Image (cartoon, rainbow, N blue to C red):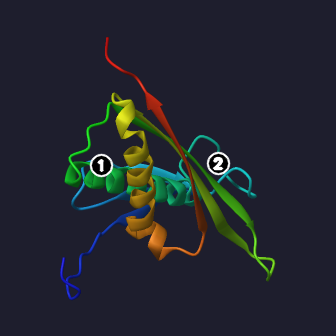
């Protein structure tokens, strides 16, 4: 990718009712409802919030970065599971911010000799994730590599 290259990711949001809106994109098939999280006045339970989407953005970028790094490195793996937690807290001015995202990545491989490389690639994926590089929140990676040798 050259330094002059730009990409655009367009979305539309339409108010639905109360504190709920619907997100769609002219380039995607699915629509997604989004609402104020239930921790705030008027918040809605059971609907994706901007805070969920922020955390999902960091986590999905980590996933796609890892799969690209693994493919480029010709590194085979059996499975990758990611659970993440986005932390909202008040900053020094008393305003709420998304201050931290913890990514718990469990990578399953079939070759014990490749465990160190697996950890290196997980760390590399976190380093190259463009969403992580674009935000102020601290991103913490907690990698685990499991060995499951086929019988």
- Residue 78 higher or lower than 51, as above or below: above
Q: Distance between the residues labelled 1 and 2?
A: 34 Å
Closer to us: 3 or 110: 110
Which quadrant: the C terminus?
top left
Which residue is drawn at the image coordinates 66% and 67% (left, top)? 99
Query: What residue appears at the point 64 percent right and 43 percent down from the top-left corner?
Result: 45
Q: In this view, does 11 lie to the left or right of 45?
A: left
The residue wearing badge 1 is 67
On the question of residue 141 being in view, the answer is: yes
Residue 49 x/y as whole percent: 56, 54
Crowding near the residue tagged with mark 2, few <14, some 14–19, many ≥20 C-alpha atoms within 10 Å: some
Frontmost of labels 1 and 2 is 1
Q: Which label's residue is closer to the chain start, 1 or 2?
A: 2
Which mark, residue 117? none
Which of the numbered marks, if any, corresponds to residue 44? Answer: 2
Badge 2 marks a residue whose secondary structure is: loop
Q: Residue at x 30, y 47 (%)?
A: 30
Mark 1 residue element? helix
Location of residue 42 with respect to 77 vertically, above or below: below
Does residue 62 sit above or below 2 in this rendering? above
Query: Residue 31 at what x, y percent from top left?
Result: 35, 50
Residue 1, placed above or below residue 68: below
Most distant residue in the bottom direction: 4
Q: Is residue 18 visible?
A: no
The image shows residue 37 at horizontal and vertical percentages of 65, 53
Q: In which quarter of the image is residue 47?
A: top right
């Amino acid at each position: 990718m050259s330094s002059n290259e730009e990409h655009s990711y367009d979305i539309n949001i339409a108010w639905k009712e109360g504190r709920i809106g619907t997100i769609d994109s002219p380039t995607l098939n699915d629509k997604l409802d989004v609402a104020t999280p239930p921790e705030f006045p008027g918040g809605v339970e059971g609907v994706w919030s901007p805070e969920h989407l922020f955390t999902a953005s960091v986590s999905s970028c980590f996933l796609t970065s890892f799969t690209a790094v693994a493919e480029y490195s010709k590194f085979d793996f059996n499975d990758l599971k990611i659970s993440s937690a986005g932390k909202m807290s008040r900053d020094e001015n008393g305003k709420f911010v998304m201050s931290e995202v913890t990514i718990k990545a469990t990578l399953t491989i079939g070759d014990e000799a490749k465990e160190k490389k697996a950890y290196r690639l997980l760390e590399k994926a976190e380093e190259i994730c463009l969403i992580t590089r674009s935000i102020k929140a601290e991103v913490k990676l907690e990698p685990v590599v499991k060995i499951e040798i086929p019988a």
